């Protein structure tokens, strides 16, 4: 049985192309959008990624700086312990600790110079103080950025203090003097006054 539909009204006899055409239009409109979103990022997503990367970079930088500070602190403590040994050897050979610049050079103390503060204008980073009344000495030092400070004396082990605490006055008071200007104080700085140049007694 053959049914001719060529003269049928598109809206009659169950013939309804419009819904199908509408669905096709929806598919054509939606599909390209879905394809783009599955292969790219929105501006908001990119901003979130950038923020997360920035946070992670900040955390890594803080951790790295902390590791550097601890490494420098360890080097300075080792230097001061070794310097104390060299000064003790000098005393054993000469009957007293160094009291002149040349004697301080002759003691042969060696330091890891990159671990010490050198960027504060007009201030030293290392101090040798001798008490002529008691025959004691003290060595004080600050690490880079004054992150850590340490003082060792002829009679005591290394003491850890804040970096900004270590000055010529503080170092001298560690061995019973009133200040670095005390009449019994003999003081030498590690850096030349007002410069970042090391003095000769601070050997590499």
Image (spheres, helix red, strand yellow):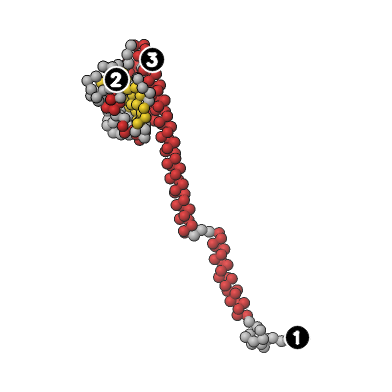
Marks 2 and 1, Cα distance to the nearest angstrom? 123 Å
Question: Against 6, is 101 above or below?
Answer: above
The quadrant of the image that shows the C terminus is top left
Question: What residue did someone put label 3 on?
Answer: 89
Which is nearer the N-term, disc 2 or disc 3? 3
**Residue 45 or residue 169, whichever sits in front:** 169
**Residue 153 or residue 37, whichever sits in front:** 153
Q: Quadrant of residue 102?
A: top left
Question: What residue did someone put label 2 on?
Answer: 130
Residue at x 55% of width, y 70% of height: 29
Find residue 49 and report its horizontal and vertical position in percent.
48, 53
Find residue 14 and report its horizontal and vertical position in percent.
66, 84
**Residue 37 in view (yes/no):** yes
Dot 3: few (<14), some (14–19), or many (≥20) neighbours within 10 Å?
some
Which is nearer the N-term, disc 3 or disc 1? 1
Q: Quadrant of residue 132?
A: top left
| Count of residue discs | 3
Which is closer to the viewer, label 3 or label 1? 3
Question: Against 174, is 57 above or below?
Answer: below
Question: What residue did someone put label 1 on?
Answer: 2
SS for dot 3: helix
Dot 1: few (<14), some (14–19), or many (≥20) neighbours within 10 Å?
few
């Amino acid at each position: 049985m053959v049914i001719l539909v060529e003269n049928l009204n598109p809206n009659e006899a169950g013939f309804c192309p419009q819904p199908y055409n509408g669905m096709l239009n929806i598919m054509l409109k939606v599909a390209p959008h879905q394809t783009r979103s599955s292969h790219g990022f929105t501006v908001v997503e990119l901003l979130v990624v950038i923020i997360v990367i920035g946070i992670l970079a900040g955390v890594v930088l803080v951790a790295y700086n902390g590791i550097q500070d601890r490494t420098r602190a360890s080097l300075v403590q080792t230097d001061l312990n070794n310097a104390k040994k060299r000064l003790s050897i000098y005393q054993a050979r000469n009957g007293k600790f160094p009291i002149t610049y040349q004697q301080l050079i002759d003691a042969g103390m060696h330091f890891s110079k990159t671990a010490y503060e050198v960027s504060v204008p007009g201030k030293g980073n290392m101090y040798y103080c001798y008490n002529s009344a008691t025959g004691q000495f003290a060595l004080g030092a600050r690490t880079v950025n004054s992150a850590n400070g340490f003082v060792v004396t002829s009679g005591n082990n290394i003491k850890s203090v804040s970096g900004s605490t270590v000055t010529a006055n503080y170092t001298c008071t560690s061995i019973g003097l009133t200040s670095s200007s005390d009449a019994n104080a003999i003081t030498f700085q590690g850096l030349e006054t007002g410069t970042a140049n090391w003095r000769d007694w601070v050997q590499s």
